[in-house]
Image (spheres, rainbow, N blue to C red):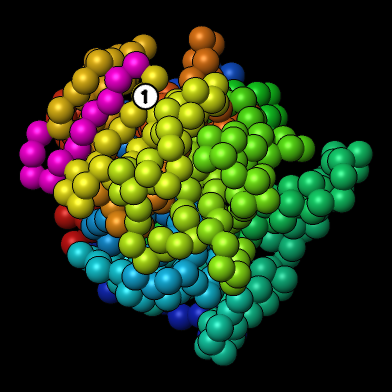
């Protein structure tokens, strides 16, 4: 009865079947921000019964190394487009577009995506739901670039799905129930926090429903991103009971989606993965922006000359300002007089003597990345440095990764070889320091953070029953790029 009603509403609203390759359909479910370690923790605390059951059948779970930056904007770009070149974080200044780009700001993100040099469009003829990028999707696109619904056709398409959600009684009742539960559970929180929680839960519910719709339509390639865990982990910490409990709701979404596949006339290969993890963190910037104070002191500037921004502030006066752009455990520092062409180390040291040494003396600043020539970049730590020169092997002095396991250090060095030469990196990139308890400093109000390179944030997971991808997951030399290329190969 449920299926018949669903199909009837699809027909009435003009949402026709779309499948062209009934025997080769692929569904990718992304659980945002969930590390391999935190997933295992959640399964051990019985928060993921559906996923646990999959692993008892023909599915395989393994971690992969996402490298720098541990951010959705970079990982998703590599998955969708085959490259994440020149994406240094969730927010950055694009030196060729002369604009700040943020992963959830539609106008600037649209411009960036349209100009990005892509190697593939993974979701051609498919649908993407709650993604950063469109991925070439042509059926349903709910991505960062469409947040303001710039085209009438996009608005009309989404209205069809919203009408279906209202007319379909089960979905309508679920939404009302979740809304009431959220209001009751979080009535003591401040208004802004309660609104954000309600929005995230509602979007997760609606995203699950849209995925079910696309399955019944037979859309050949579907991608959906569930954001709930990432939000809770940021606020409370990656293994806090509130964050782990949020996995119960996501697990129910997975259960519903898998049930929809079984009851539809189409078969799907299912891949469940995350884009990055989260590491336990100490929020260095709370009520006061301590990092801005530390930067101002290091450069011997008035505090007002350091502007902490998420990309909405650019000064028009003639003074030189430092734009401090937080991305979890990183800070991208852009100088207002060098937005087109970044400073080199000797230029900065001449203008601001001892600035790098001063930065390294601050307890929350663990590593400093700066260009020391047009061909090379240097990563400083309190105990050493690494020089990355184009087309040459890195050279190491001292112990810049002391305390980090040798295998992880080698992975980081390989990742930095590419990341260090991104033109869009700040004039200086600051990475949060670590603590004796294996926490990392965050420059946002995060108890769980990512964006840098330390700890679980670099180790997301992948689960699948596809033999080609399973073989890659068991490959000791697997990289994120090789894993995503196998996913693309399998979707052809």
Q: Considering depth in this image, is 4 or 418 the residue closer to the camera?
A: 418
Residue on which disc 1 sits = 381
At a point 77% along the width and 37% down the height, the residue shown is 287
Could one spot residue 151 in this view of the protein?
yes
Whether residue 264 appears in this view of the structure is no
Seen at 53% across and 11% down, the residue is 437
Q: What residue occupies the far left of the structure in this picture? A: 392
Say above or below: 439 vs 121: above
Horizontal relation, residue 223 to residue 45: left or right: left
Residue sitting nearer the eye, 2 or 473: 473
Residue shown at the point (49%, 23%) measured from the top left: 361
Q: Position of residue 344 (x, y in %)?
A: 31, 49
* Residue at the spot 56% in from the left edge and 56% down from the top edge: 321
For the record, the magenta segment spans 383-393
Left or right position of 314 against 136: right
**x, y (%) of residue 416?**
26, 38
Quarter assignment of residue 252: top right
Q: At which x and y percent is residue 415?
A: 25, 37
User: Which corner quadrant holds the N terminus?
Assistant: bottom right
Residue 58, given in percent of the width and then of the height, sits at 30, 32
Quadrant of residue 482 within the rendered picture: top left
| Mark 1 crowd level (few <14, some 14–19, many ≥20, 10 Å Cα) | many
Which element type, helix, strand or loop, lies under badge 1? strand
Q: Note whether 160 is above or below 23 in the view shown.
A: below
How many tags in the picture?
Answer: 1
Residue lying furthest bottom in this view? 152
- Which quadrant would the C terminus be assigned to in this image? bottom left
Assess whether residue 353 is covered by the magenta stretch.
no
């Amino acid at each position: 009865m449920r299926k018949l009603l669903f199909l009837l509403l699809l027909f009435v609203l003009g949402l026709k079947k779309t499948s062209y390759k009934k025997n080769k359909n692929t569904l990718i479910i992304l659980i945002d921000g969930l590390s391999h370690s935190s997933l295992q923790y959640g399964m051990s605390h019985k928060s993921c019964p559906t996923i646990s059951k999959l692993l008892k059948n023909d599915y395989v779970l393994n971690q992969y190394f996402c490298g720098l930056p541990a951010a959705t904007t970079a990982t998703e770009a590599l998955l969708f487009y085959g490259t994440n070149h020149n994406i240094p974080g969730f927010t950055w200044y694009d030196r060729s577009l002369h604009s700040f780009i943020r992963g959830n700001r539609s106008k600037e993100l649209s411009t960036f995506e349209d100009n990005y040099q892509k190697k593939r469009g993974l979701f051609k003829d498919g649908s993407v739901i709650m993604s950063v990028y469109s991925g070439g999707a042509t059926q349903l696109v709910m991505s960062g670039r469409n947040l303001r619904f710039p085209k009438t056709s996009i608005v009309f398409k989404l209205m069809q799905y919203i009408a279906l959600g209202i007319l379909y009684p089960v979905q309508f009742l679920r939404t009302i129930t979740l809304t009431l539960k959220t209001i009751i559970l979080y009535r003591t929180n401040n208004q802004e926090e309660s609104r954000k929680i309600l929005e995230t839960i509602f979007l997760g519910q609606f995203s699950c429903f849209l995925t079910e719709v696309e399955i019944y339509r037979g859309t050949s390639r579907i991608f959906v991103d569930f954001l709930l865990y990432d939000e809770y982990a940021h606020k409370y910490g990656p293994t806090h009971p509130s964050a782990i409990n949020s996995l119960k709701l996501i697990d129910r979404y997975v259960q519903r989606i898998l049930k929809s596949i079984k009851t539809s006339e189409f078969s799907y290969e299912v891949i469940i993965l995350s884009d990055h993890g989260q590491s336990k963190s100490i929020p260095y910037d709370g009520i006061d922006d301590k990092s801005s104070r530390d930067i101002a002191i290091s450069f011997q500037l008035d505090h007002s000359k350091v502007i902490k921004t998420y990309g909405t502030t650019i000064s028009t006066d003639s003074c030189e300002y430092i734009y401090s752009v937080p991305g979890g455990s990183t800070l991208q520092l852009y100088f207002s007089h060098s937005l087109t062409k970044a400073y080199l180390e000797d230029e900065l040291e001449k203008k601001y003597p001892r600035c790098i040494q001063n930065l390294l003396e601050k307890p929350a600043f663990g590593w400093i990345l700066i260009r020391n020539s047009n061909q090379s970049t240097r990563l400083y730590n309190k105990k050493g440095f690494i020089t990355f020169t184009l087309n040459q092997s890195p050279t190491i002095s001292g112990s810049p990764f002391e305390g980090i396991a040798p295998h992880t250090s080698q992975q980081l060095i390989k990742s930095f070889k590419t990341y260090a030469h991104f033109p869009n990196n700040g004039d200086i990139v600051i990475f949060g320091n670590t603590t004796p308890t294996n926490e990392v400093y965050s420059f946002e109000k995060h108890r769980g953070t990512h964006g840098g390179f330390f700890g679980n944030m670099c180790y997301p997971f992948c689960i699948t029953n596809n033999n080609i991808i399973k073989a890659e997951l068991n490959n000791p030399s697997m990289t994120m790029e090789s894993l995503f290329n196998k996913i693309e190969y399998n979707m052809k």
